[in-house]
Image: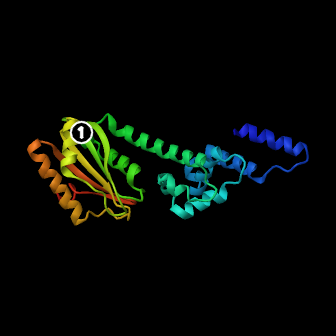
Amino acid sequence: MSVKKTAAEAGAQAAEGVPAPHYLGHRDRLRERFRKAGADALADYELIELILFRAIPRRDVKPLAKALIARFGSFAEVVAARPERLAEIDGLGEAAIVELRIIEAAARRLARSSIEKRPSMSSLPAVIDYCRTAMAFLDREEFRILFLDKKNFLIADEVQGVGTVDHAPVYPREIMRRALELSACALILVHNHPSGDPEPSTEDIFLTHQIIAVGKPLKIAVHDHLVIGKHGHASLKEMRLI
């Protein structure tokens, strides 16, 4: 429902002596604040409200938006939440979940566009930004590979393993088989720590060296292994662990 239609309906109700729902004026005011001052002027739950307006046109969505923030913690964590977890929230239907997933997909697409046409190793901050957008707030560990050509341009970005809160199954030979299929010359390994702490574990370091060893006779280099947390990242290359 558009803002104009909502205002027209409110006017018609007032003319008939029927009070307009209180949330109609709130929606108009919130949209106006966003239009004039931008997202920085709004709390996380208010941004969630703006998204929910589209999917839930005839209900006060402020309590629902606040419930989402209370459950997941922040705007980013709400948007990154898996659909099955979102569906656990009372009052959040399929249409609203789709709206949230669209926002998450748009954020990923925007972040990825900044690395697709540039050599990845010369734009590592953009690579890190993309990986944080895609992975920082996931509630399960995910292992992602960025496959690069001989000029370090991105060929493919693929998730190789999805696991539990502290483990994702990864097989070095499968990674190299896929690299050969794509004619990749180098890789950037990326995985997240749902705990939030990006400090690489002993297992992370060992796995990285396994992948390097399998790739060496194939002349497929591992440029870095990034560990993504909620509030930061770690680079095994910068830490001189590879």
Out of 10 and 42, give the one closest to the viewer.
10
Q: Is 219 displayed left or right of 239 in the figure? A: left
Q: Is 136 displayed left or right of 154 in the figure? A: right
Task: Using a 10 Å C-alpha cutoff, classify the residue at mark 1 as few (fewer than 14 neighbours), some (14 to 19) or many (20 or more).
Answer: many
Out of 139 and 46, give the one closest to the viewer.
139
Would you name the residue on which mark 1 appears?
A: 148
Q: Is 148 displayed left or right of 126 in the figure? A: left
Confirm whether residue 37 shows in the render: no
Q: Which residue occupies 40% across, 43% down?
A: 111
Vertically, is 8 above or below 216?
above
Residue 61: image location, x then y, percent: 67, 54
Out of 155 and 167, give the one closest to the viewer.
167
Q: Which residue occupies 27% across, 41% down?
A: 120
Residue 226: image location, x then y, percent: 28, 54
Q: Quadrant of the C terminus?
A: bottom left
Q: Which residue occupies 24% across, 43% down?
A: 121
Indicate the quadrant where residue 193 lies: bottom left
Q: Is 125 displayed left or right of 43 in the figure? A: left
Task: Give the image's coloring scheme.
Answer: rainbow
Indicate the quadrant where residue 99 lies: top right
Q: Which residue occupies 18% across, 48% down?
A: 173
Confirm whether residue 21 shows in the render: yes
Residue 82: image location, x then y, percent: 47, 53
Indicate the quadrant where residue 219 lies: top left
Residue 225: image location, x then y, percent: 24, 53
Q: Amino acid at mark 1?
A: Leu
Q: Check disc 1 and report its element: helix, strand or loop.
A: strand
Q: Quadrant of the N terminus?
A: top right
Vertically, is 208 above or below 147?
below
